[in-house]
Each structure stands twice: as C-alpha cells, then as structure tokens.
Image (spheres, rainbow, N blue to C red):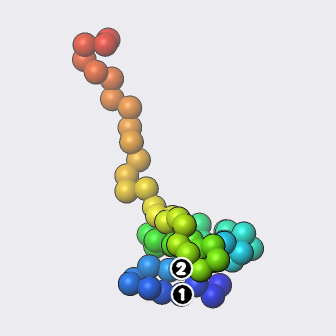
Amino acid sequence: MTARHIGGMKTVTQRELAARSKAVLDDVEAGEVHHITRNGTEIAEVRPISSRRRFVPHPERR
C-alpha cells in the first residue's frame, strides 16, 4: 500500500481504499487511523472504535 503518513496518521486515496480495503481495515483493527482523500481533498477518517458499547438495562425499566 502506498499510504502517506501525515501527522502520525496514514492518508489513503479513494482508489487505494477500493483496491486495498482489507489492508486498510487490518491497520485500523491494529489501532491505526487513516484519512481518505478524493481528488486530493480529505473526505473521511477511518479509526478504530474506542470501546464496544454494552447494553446495561436501566433499573427502572425492569
């Protein structure tokens, strides 16, 4: 993958994301953040979920 590192984050073009989505998602799963560009403009940020939410019932609703 030819991602560029800018400020500690990887920047990937839309075309690269389409061609190498598995590699990008593997990086995200490993904790990396990717910025996605289209025509040289950043349009999205892909980052890992900080923590999984868990349903905890409210005591009054039981």
Q: Do the residues labelled 1 and 2 touch (CB within 8 Å)?
A: yes
Q: In this view, does 58 lie to the left or right of 44?
A: left
**Crowdedness of circle 2 by 10 Å Cα count: few (<14), some, many (20+)?**
many
Q: In this view, does 19 lie to the left or right of 35?
A: right
Q: What residue type is labelled 1?
A: Arg
Answer above or below: position of 61 versus 22.
Answer: above
In the picture, residue 56 is in which quadrant?
Answer: top left
Residue 17 in picture, x, y percent from top left: 67, 71
SS of the residue at dot 1?
strand
Residue 4 in picture, x, y percent from top left: 54, 87
Q: Residue 15 or 21: which is nearer the viewer?
A: 15
Which label sits on residue 15? none
Q: Residue 14 or 24: which is nearer the viewer?
A: 14
Q: Residue 33 or 37: which is nearer the viewer?
A: 37
Q: Residue 26 or 44: which is nearer the viewer?
A: 44
Residue 23 appears in view? no
The residue where tag 2 is placed is: 11
Residue 62 in picture, x, y percent from top left: 32, 11
Residue at figure coordinates x 28%, y 21% from the top left: 58
Answer above or below: position of 25 versus 13.
Answer: above
The residue where tag 1 is placed is: 4
